[in-house]
Image: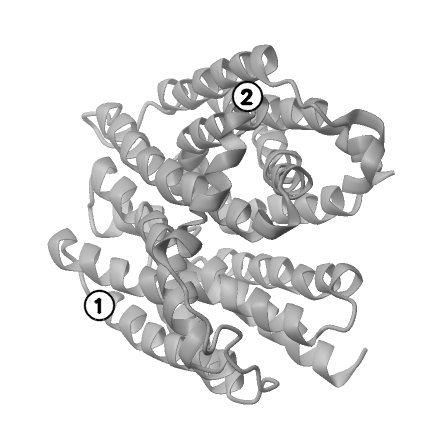
Amino acid sequence: MSAVRTKLSTMMFVQYFIWGAWWVTLGTYLTNTLNFDGSQVGLTYGTTAIAAMISPFFVGMVADRFFSTERILAALHITGGLILFYASAISDFTSFYPIVICYALLYMPTLALTNSISFHHLPDAASDFPKVRVLGTIGWIVAGILVGRLGLEATATPMKIAAGSSLAMGIYCLFLPHTPPTGRGKSVTVRDVLGLDALSLLKDRSFAVFVLGSFLLCIPLQFYYAFTNLFLNEIGMAEPATKMTMGQMSEIVFMLLMSWFLVRLGVKRILLVGMFAWALRYVMFAFGDVGPNLWMLYAGIILHGICYDFFFVTGQIYVDQQADPRIRGAAQGLLAFVTLGVGLFIGAWISGAIVEANSLAGGGHDWKSIWMVPAAGAAGILLLFAALFKPNRDMGAETA
């Protein structure tokens, strides 16, 4: 492995270790320790969606034009680490929520910037980037195992671990390969940043259905990200943060098998399987327990590989295939804005409201009723998508 690839792989490991160290277990900490209600937890998880809607402006109109990538990464991570450490000492929602928004606004742009610096320095991005990016997933897994094994899920310690890691990452970024701003001297408009040129693709009915389906699916999927760890803790699963890393492990497996599935199933079948997996996962959670049906909980977690790869990764590939080369970046930006931004924000609000509405008087929640809501939502989207989505190109054949 070259020195540059080693540096980039380490960067990816720490980048996602930071996120995985505190984000997965945050709902448990906020509910069990700070006594936030379900709506407040949902709003907190919506902060990254707010940042996902705003960060393209920052990356496109500031980071890409005025600063070298490694230096702006350093500044974002160091400032973010200090803010996150401060947030770990706050106990009331009114103060906590805006501070987490500030942190999300600093962290979310680093996701695009770490990708950007990798693509800039890898000689064969198509071949080398997946090998670098997989270290990010491994970093997330290591963080989850660490927090779970140490029993830190209901404490502020994961936030402090993430804050310390962010500070270390900021210093490390100063030693990354120099990457000058790619957009220096170029005019950039709001239209470019938001990918509005990609709106022309919506004239194609199937592409419009795809975007709509992706947006709608992001609403029920936020239930998983915001409340799975709290659910597993409440029903008594041992070390749930550690067990949840099985989802990322399966993500790696299915990512490696993606080309095989694309050739044999094609885009529509793979997307439908991904949607079905989301509905099935929630049914597994609704009827699973830590007794005889423990296998259902494990199955629901392991389904993450299919849920994520079969829908989101396949969707990104589909967009790349459908868009003209001139607007591929804009099309991917539009998809991210609609799904990771608007979709997840609405999902955070709805999931929080549903969890709060199913709180039990004696403590805890009616999880069966909670999980059946996103299960029904994902199933409904699946039926709508199956009836209306008719891609005019066989991506599987093209991939072959």
Relative depth, front residue between 198 and 271:
198
Relative depth, front residue between 374 and 336:
336
Q: Residue 146, which numbered label?
A: none
Extreme residue in the right direction: 400
Element class at badge 1 = loop
Residue at 65% in and 50% down: 325
In this picture, is 84 found above or below 348? below
Left or right, 102 with reference to 282? left
Q: CA distance from mark 1 to mark 2?
A: 50 Å
In the image, which is nearer the foreground, mark 1 or mark 2? 2
Residue at 50% in and 62% down: 111
> What residue is disc 2 on?
205
Relative depth, front residue between 209 and 199:
199
Extreme residue in the bottom direction: 175
The amino acid pointed to by label 2 is Arg
Quadrant location, the C terminus: top right
Residue at 72% in and 76% down: 5
The amino acid pointed to by label 1 is Ala
Would you identify the image quadrant in which residue 46 lies?
top left
Q: Position of residue 92 (x, y in %)?
A: 14, 55
Residue 239 seen by the camera = no
Left or right, 11 with reference to 212? right
Quadrant location, the N terminus: bottom right
Q: What color scheme is it? A: one colour
Q: Position of residue 96 (x, y in %)?
A: 19, 58
Q: Residue 89, which numbered label?
A: 1
Q: Position of residue 260 (x, y in %)?
A: 84, 37
Report if the CB atoms under discs 1 and 2 are less than 8 Å apart.
no
In this picture, is 131 found above or below 314? below
In this picture, is 259 found above or below 14? above
